[in-house]
Image (cartoon, rainbow, N blue to C red):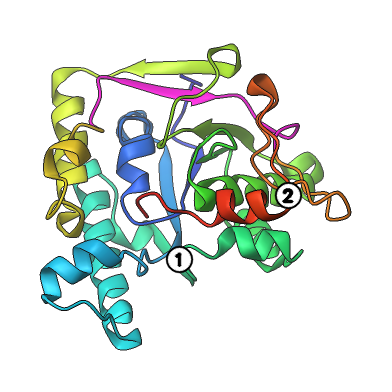
């Protein structure tokens, strides 16, 4: 992994509470062990997570107040996860953008999230930015990748080194930058951090905990993969290596985000 010293600052972007542990739980541990500072930014609260909510609440209809309460619970789980990984819970920022709506923001040309992330980076001055990948199958993850790369574009010489991670699907091996082989202690700690997200274990415990893998992969920056072109209606997530380009209605469906949030 990139050498991290005690004056380095690592900023981890998580579209939802749980992505910090799944995508970068090993890297967070290594950075802290090397004396670096780690801060995690949670873009949404993961409140639009209907099936676990229906199971827990024993009701089909989910009210806005119940979604809000669910999001607050998921943010608390994220703070606990960060403590397990070795950093203080006050090193977390919760932006509370709407879950499952980030791609809609990007399609509309709404740059508020990019501006917000750029402001956070100017204040925190990270030397390493760890963000979701544009190769990820989840619409929120691709949207965060887009906004993160847009934010970095505006930083000039103050831009941090940038790495990306994939949670849903598999990244292109030709874009693999490096990986971490986690030892038994690191792997168990990552599993324990993922298990802090108890709201996500109700319906898919084994699948969810299986994200604790001994190999944690990170990919190179993806400025060429995150694009919008409204006139042609080309949308975020055109994976050039697999010729995956979506247009019009198909784009709206592909970006609507039906995967786990």
Q: How far across and down, in percent of the image, does residue 120 sit?
A: 60, 60
Give the residues in magenta.
212-225
Q: Is residue 248 left or right of residue 8?
A: right
Q: Which residue is mark 2?
A: 150
> Label 2: few (<14), some or many (≥20) within 10 Å?
many
**Is 214 in the magenta?**
yes
Q: Is residue 13 above or below residue 175?
A: below
**Is 94 in the magenta?**
no
Residue at 34%, 56% (x, y): give it.
Answer: 17
Q: Is residue 260 above or below residue 245?
A: below
User: Extreme right residue here?
Assistant: 231
Q: Main secondary structure of the magenta part?
A: loop
Determine the CA span between mark 2 and mark 1. 20 Å
Residue at 29%, 67% (x, y): give it.
Answer: 50
> Label 1: few (<14), some or many (≥20) within 10 Å?
many
Residue at 59%, 12% (x, y): give it.
Answer: 174
Q: Which residue is mark 1?
A: 99
In terms of secondary structure, where does tag 1 sit?
loop
């Amino acid at each position: 992994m990139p050498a991290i010293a005690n004056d380095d600052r690592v900023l981890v972007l998580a579209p939802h509470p749980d992505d910090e542990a799944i995508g970068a739980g090993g890297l967070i541990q290594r950075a802290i062990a090397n004396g670096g500072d780690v801060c995690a930014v949670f873009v949404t609260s993961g409140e639009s997570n209907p099936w676990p909510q229906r199971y827990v609440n024993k009701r089909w209809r989910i009210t806005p107040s119940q979604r809000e309460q669910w999001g607050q619970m998921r943010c608390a789980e994220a703070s606990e996860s960060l403590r397990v990984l070795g950093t203080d819970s006050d090193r977390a920022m919760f932006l509370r953008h709407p879950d499952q709506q980030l791609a809609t923001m990007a399609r509309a040309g709404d740059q508020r999230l990019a501006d917000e992330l750029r402001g956070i980076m100017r204040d925190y001055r990270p030397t390493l930015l760890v963000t979701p990948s544009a190769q990820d199958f989840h619409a929120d993850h691709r949207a965060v990748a887009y906004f993160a790369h847009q934010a970095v574009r505006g930083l000039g010489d103050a831009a941090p080194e940038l790495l990306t991670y994939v949670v849903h699907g598999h990244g292109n091996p030709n874009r693999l930058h490096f990986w971490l082989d986690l030892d038994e202690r690191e792997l168990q700690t990552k599993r324990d951090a993922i298990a802090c997200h108890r709201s996500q274990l109700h319906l898919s415990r084994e699948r969810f905990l299986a994200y604790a893998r001994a190999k944690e992969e990170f990919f190179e920056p993806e400025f060429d993969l995150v694009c919008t072109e409204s006139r042609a209606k080309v949308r975020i997530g055109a994976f050039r290596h697999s010729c995956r380009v979506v247009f019009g209605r198909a784009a709206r469906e592909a970006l609507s985000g039906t995967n786990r949030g």
